[in-house]
Image: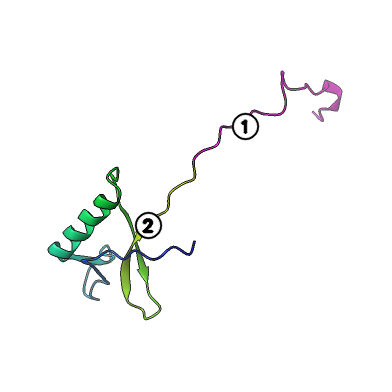
Amino acid sequence: MNEEKKFVDGMIVKLPPDTAPDFVKLKLSFKLDEFGSWIGAQKSEDPSLEWINVEIKEGRSGKWYAERDTFKPSPQQPARQPARSGPPKSVPNDDIPW
């Protein structure tokens, strides 16, 4: 997991002002030229790209920033079959406490 961080160019993350209502959690600003170029570069890197996931993080300095989430799940392995075959064993009635 020592991948290089991929910051989202042109996306600025800020906490809302104290006067904002409680349901406003953060503010995002987009510098369109930078953000558009960044998105285009991501698509050029991987033409099959349909989605970009972004995580909002807090730096050691306390400043918030946007980082591209590059997690890719590993290919799924075929499901294992249960070790037991056949119907489940029944419990004798004399072992049931009621």
Q: Return the disc, 1 or 2, that comes first in the chain's sequence.
A: 2
Instruction: Tell me which residue sits at (85%, 27%) in the image.
Output: 95
Extreme top residue here? 86
Looking at the image, residue 45 lies above or below residue 93? below
Decide whether residue 93 is among the magenta residues.
Answer: yes
Residue interval drawn in magenta: 75-98
Residue 35: name its quadrant.
bottom left
Protein image colouring: rainbow
Which residue corresponds to mark 1?
A: 80
Q: Residues within 10 Å of mark 2 (few under 14, many from 20)?
A: some
Residue 4: name its quadrant.
bottom left
Decide whether residue 73 is among the magenta residues.
Answer: no
Which residue corresponds to mark 2?
A: 69
Looking at the image, residue 98 lies above or below residue 8? above
* Residue 44 locus on image (x, y percent): 24, 51
Whether pointer 1 and pointer 2 mark residues with C-beta atoms closer than 8 Å, the reply is no
Looking at the image, residue 13 lies above or below residue 70? below
Give the SS element for disc 2: strand
Instruction: Tell me which residue sits at (79%, 28%) in the image.
Output: 98
* Residue 14 locus on image (x, y percent): 26, 72
The amino acid type found where label 1 is placed reads Arg
Question: Is residue 64 or residue 95 the one in the foreground?
Answer: 64
Instruction: Tell me which residue sits at (62%, 32%) in the image.
Output: 80
* Residue 76 locus on image (x, y percent): 51, 38
* Residue 28 locus on image (x, y percent): 22, 65
On screen, residue 8 versus residue 82, left or right, reads left
Extreme left residue here? 33
Extreme bottom residue here? 61
The amino acid type found where label 2 is placed reads Asp
